Amino acid sequence: MLADKYGRTFKTLRVSLTNACNLFCNYCTDQPASEKASQPEDNVLSTKDYIKIINSLHNRLNLETIRLTGGEPLLYKDISNLIEGIREIGIKNVKLTTNAVFLKEKAVPLKNAGITNINVSLDSLDPESFFKISKRRNLKKILEGIDHALAIGIPVKVNTVVMKGMNTDQILPLLEFARERSISIRFLEVMKMGHLHNSYQDLYFSQEEILEKIAEQHQFIPMDREHGATATYWITDKKQVFGIIANESHPFCGDCNRLRLDSYGNIYGCLSNDNGISIKDHSDDSLKLEYSLKQALLQKQEVQFAGSVMSMRYIGG
Ligand code: SAM
């Protein structure tokens, strides 16, 4: 088995389908919001390319999970065929991380193609703070998308980046939103990525502060952390489970099993390293692929998340 000296290997592959996004969230970009979604650059992989690369990686790594992300993965027009192709390779879990702007219209095709879970990034239930974060006014559409996906039987989780001065007042309403729907919610500490690499402290709201806010209305106890998990979970006295992804204050590099593939065919072993290793032209050459995977494994941090100047939009959130 391919593993480093800490026993870490790659079991989950996060695949970025595009750099483009139809939201302009403050943690991903400081660019002014344009009328249209940002546009993908040239040379992105085709569905055939993705399937070929994923197949080679699966043959070597026996992957358990593929997570499609971006950019905004629902902007990738051929996503249903891609999901079907990945299912045919025999990978058990094919998950999606999306802002859900197009979820209402795409939920049925996604389900028919074989998607197994969807994580929705939802940072606020308040239209004004949602707009302040995303520069878009499509909160209603997103909420309808979540409810539609749930109605047709797709498991949905919500992820919320908690930011000082932006949405800390949304922690309790979002917790209630998740409770009403019996869905899982995870709160994320803001990470030193992209344009926030040196200024993330301005927005940073720690795990401890998130727990203090939840303690205003709930009693809770910690749960055991699963091996390789990004989140730590707590359970409230009303039996609601919530998680916190605390990259900064409680990093989880020690058992990280994630590999990333961007939309140009580069792999990355760690979010903290922006040196993509191209496998586009040699994913079917087992010796060269092995060498590239070993390089990617060496990118993993020992314990502490170091961040990167590359926005998560490019490396796949
Ligand atoms: N567009 C999709 C979405 O909105 O879910 C997928 C890509 S987006 C980069 C995925 C998620 O990464 C964001 O919604 C946010 O939760 C997280 N993210 C991106 N940059 C971040 C940062 N600097 N700190 C914390 N989370 C970040």
Image: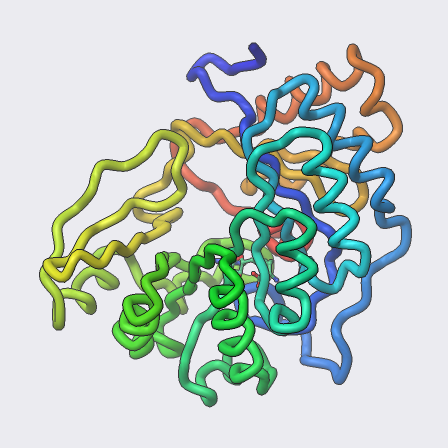
| Picture colour scheme | rainbow
Question: Which one is in front, 5 or 284?
Answer: 284
Give the x, y percent position of residue 246: 35, 49
Ligand 1 - quadrant of the structure image: bottom right
Q: Residue at x 67, y 53 (%)?
A: 112
Residue plotted at (40% across, 78% down): 166
- Residue 61: which quarter of the image? top right
Q: How many marks?
A: 0
Q: Is residue 305 visible?
A: yes
**Which quarter of the rendered picture does the N terminus lie within?**
top right
Q: Is residue 65 left or right of residue 108?
A: left
In this rendering, would 311 be left or right of 130?
right
Residue 140, position in %: x, y? Answer: 52, 84
Image position of 291 (left or right of 216): right
For residue 312, which quarter of the picture? bottom right
Quadrant assignment, res 24: bottom right
Residue depicted at x 57% and y 81%: 141
Residue 210 sits above or below residue 299 on the image: below
Task: Give the percent coordinates (x, y) of residue 137.
Answer: 58, 87
* Coordinates of residue 87 in the picture (x, y in percent): 68, 37
Query: Does residue 275 appear anywhere in the picture?
Result: no
Q: Which residue is pictured at 44% across the width and 84% down the height?
A: 129
